[in-house]
Amino acid sequence: MPDKNAPNKKKTQVTATPERRRELLDTAAEVFAAQGYNATTVRKIADAAGMLAGSLYYHFDSKESMLDEILSTFLNELWEGYDGVLAAGLGPRETIEALVTESFREIDRHRAAVAIYQKESRHLSAQPRFHYLADSQQKFEKAWLGTLERGVAAQVFRADLDIRLTYRFVRDTVWVAASWYRPGGQHSPEEIARQYLSMVLDGIAVRT
């Protein structure tokens, strides 16, 4: 359904500076994360950015385009970090530690995008434009399950470990941090990752 706020299609888009474009996308990401994609209109994004809805169309042709750029930017950066970890030849435990640390760094850089991804990716991935979300999820699962399986085979992780359950636990407890994490807080993403890994890998009970 066409956006009723959309101006005449003959209007041409203008090229914003990279900084201004980033500002507008950051604003859109915060609105999408807070209100949900379906409930968000271009007018709401424009209001949050302090501009008229029609003016926003000079920079982006739709809210779908904004969401696409927000999610693809986040995932491209995430996979740049993950691919570096996976290519580094680390042991299974070290790989898990590095992947978790990269994940918290991405939450620090793209908190709103992570929150959107968590809430919206399942239904968005059914749309052709966002099919890359499903592809990324499959790649993500393969990386984590493969590392956990490698760790069990190398006797670094327990032999009785339920690999898929462990993967889901680690995945969900890392990414849910986007709901409470705020950049510039008391702890750096690296420190949060260290504390998290200590709990996941070593437990919280005192060893006797």
Image (spheres, grey):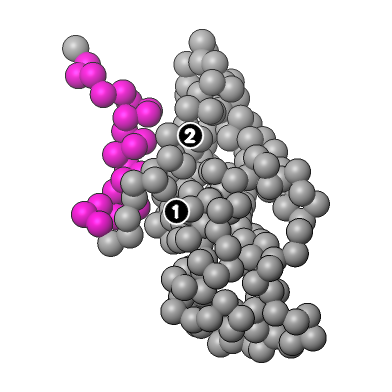
Residue at image coords 54%, 21%: 165
**Residue 111: in sight, yes or no?**
yes
- Amino acid type of the residue tagged 1 in the rendering: Ala
Disc 2 versus disc 1: nearer the observer: 1
| Left or right of 71 in this view: 49 | left
Q: Main secondary structure of the magenta part?
A: helix
Residue at image coords 60%, 58%: 71
Element type at mark 2: helix
Please give the range of residues in magenta: 185-207
Spot occupied by residue 28 in the image (x, y as percentages of width and height): 52, 66
From the image, tell me which residue sits under label 2. Answer: 172
Quarter containing the N terminus:
bottom right
Return the disc, 2 or 1, that comes first in the chain's sequence.
1
Residue placed most toward the observer, 185 or 90: 185
| Left or right of 138 in this view: 83 | left
How far separated are the C-alphas under marks 2 and 1?
19 Å
Element type at mark 1: helix
Quarter containing the C terminus:
top left
Q: Is residue 190 magenta?
A: yes
Above or below — where is 198 with respect to 135? above
From the image, tell me which residue sits under label 1. Answer: 34
Q: Is residue 201 magenta?
A: yes
- Number of callouts in the render? 2
Residue placed most toward the observer, 155 or 21: 21
